[in-house]
Amino acid sequence: MEPLAEEFAEFFEEKYSKEAGELALGYPTKRSLEVSYASLDRFSASMADELLLDPDAAIAAAEVALRKLPLGTMEFGFEPRVRFTDLPESSRVSVEDLGAAHIGKLISVDCVVTKRTEVQPKVKVAVLRCRLCDARFKILVDKNTTILPETCDSCKRRALECDEEHSEYVDLQRIEVQEPIENLRGAAPSSRVAAWMEDDLVNTVLPGQRLVITGIMRLKPPTKKQENAFVYRKYVEVVHAAKLEKDFEEIDATPAETRKFRELAKKPDVFDLIKDSIAPGIYGHDEVKQALALQLFGGTEGKKQVDGKSAIRAKIHVLILGDAGTAKTRLLQRAIEIAPKGLFVSGKSVSGVGLTASAERDELSDGGWVLKAGALVLAGGGLAAVDEIDKIDEDDRAAMHEVMESETISIAKAGIVAQFRAKTSIVAAGNPKLGRFDANAPIAPQYAIVQTLLSRFDLIFPIMDVLDETRDDKLADHVLNQHMLGGPTIASGAVGHTLDAMRAPMDTDLLRKYIAYARRRVHPALSPEAKDAIKAYYVDLRKAATGAVPITARYLDGLVRLSEASAKTRLSPTVETQDAKRAIFLVDYVLKTVMTDRTTGALDVDLVAGTPYAYAGAYRKIVAIVKGLEAEYDMVKVSLVIETAAEQGLLAKEAEKFINRAILEGDLVEPQKGFLASAKRVLE
């Protein structure tokens, strides 16, 4: 063996003898030995430096050394791979910074998979056969092999052809990775680069997954179709791929920052500080800001049902629907700025496949199909803001149902069946059906979103632009002061006290770190006192029901999630009564604002989740009146039905509406103009 291979043999015998033995026993099912760079650096700094500077030679020497180790008799050809991981900070490169300085070097890249191709065979050893003299030659195909020889070494004639049947192949899969969204700042687009995965790395990653890939940056020669023959395309030949299970960016909190987090958590008004830092430039909307603050922290992750199989959702979903010009978009954008990981999409530019995943033909794999992750997959583990949700086509909005309930996306496109993980919190905003709310009509029917989707939001906020002189005066002051403070008067210090009053109590970067720290380190559990408070609220509401359903069991899950998020804001491992009360306040606010039937004054969740109780009761009353009158008449006059309904407390206008609805639904028929009959009687 060469000197470098001999050094690697010593390294494996000293540090990885057990792992090498397990590899030999598991081969060919297991085909790789994973080696930490740190352990190599401790063994020999010069070998570690050689690996970073000339990875091709170092990895080849390591694989030769591994094959030569006395690991017992092998039934198969023993050709293991050595995969190095955990590179030092100096070798970590962002996707957007990959350039000429990294060509041929071993690097580490933090990235998100956006798409992958089908597995294809790549020639590893080409067998060439001469058509004239039948001589055979083996050519090792590596990164430098671009053209196979055509002239036979034996007969010196141009008669060589590739013998595909006897050549040796290795599996190859191309993926595309991009810069993680949370690493982007400002309006910079997300950079992308191709990565090639071989052998046992194929089919180990899916679009939407967060990876740290260790690999060698290569150049792909320009094709004949390209105009500039001196511009090369880059790609990364993957040596190792580590999946990151974390959903939020890792924050290397210093001891000083950790102490500051703990000091903040001890403040009795820490939640108010967080809430007031959400969007200090927007006046009012206190309940919405509370909801956004809790959504950013989220519930306790990792909980499962008693059977241990079904996961319990921890993500909180919030919907804001309101009149034009009420700062809905700014609230969403501010939440995305604060979130350690966030993504913003808007309106008509959004499609169903853009939200979930799409199947595309890949130019690198002869037109094969690949899956490309959409917004909700790429925002996995973070926050996805969907603005102008009412402008998205209904079929495209339907793509959100599965994500919001089960945190997965199931895809069956172009013969590809797959399921993506999409643990994403969704905050959405939109306008009522007619652009503005009618203050004299029930709020829920004015939403231009189907009930099945509405029911999946934990909190729904209507924002109405009401005429209120006192509020208008304060709002005008707030907005105009911002314009004054945004100008040269700041430099003079003339309005310093006003500026301090309008600043966010917590710096955005500090708040972002605080949220990420809480989400990774704090996993609150429900205390008996908090449980009793939530239970009492639920039971009392149900007990007070007079026919309409005021609250369903689904809201219990939401109350727990909101309570856990409140505990996280204090970095508390226990959900206490104050957290339960905060969650109850928000849910109660939504119930009384959105789900109050104005005709009866009763709470009715079916205003959002189904057919309202009062509506269903009036509908059934009309059908029952017709059926009752059929005992006396073959056909029942419409005027008689309206008259009888009025005697039972139903207005004529309402009775006409429900008669038309019953005809449309098929429960009543109109055998001739001005007369009604029940559908059952007609069938008889």
Image (spheres, rainbow, N blue to C red):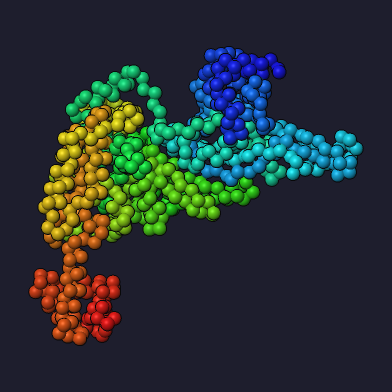
Quarter in which the N terminus is drawn: top right
One can see residue 144 in this view: yes
Question: Which residue: 51% across, 39% down?
Answer: 205
Relative to 34, is 570 on the left or the right?
Answer: left
Question: Which residue: 38% across, 54% down?
Answer: 397
Q: Please tell me whether residue 332 is drawn above or below residue 99 in the rendered image.
A: below
Residue 86 position in % (x across, y down): 51, 24
Residue 558 position in % (x across, y down): 25, 44
Relative to 187, is 467 on the left or the right?
Answer: left
Residue 54 sits in quarter: top right
- The residue nearer to you, when weighing 650 against 219, is 650
Question: Which residue: 33% across, 36% down?
Answer: 301
Q: Please tell me whether residue 683 is drawn above or below residue 505 in the rendered image.
A: below
Badge count: 0
- The residue nearer to you, when weighing 479 against 3, is 3
Quarter in which the C terminus is drawn: bottom left
Question: Which residue: 67% across, 31% down?
Answer: 75
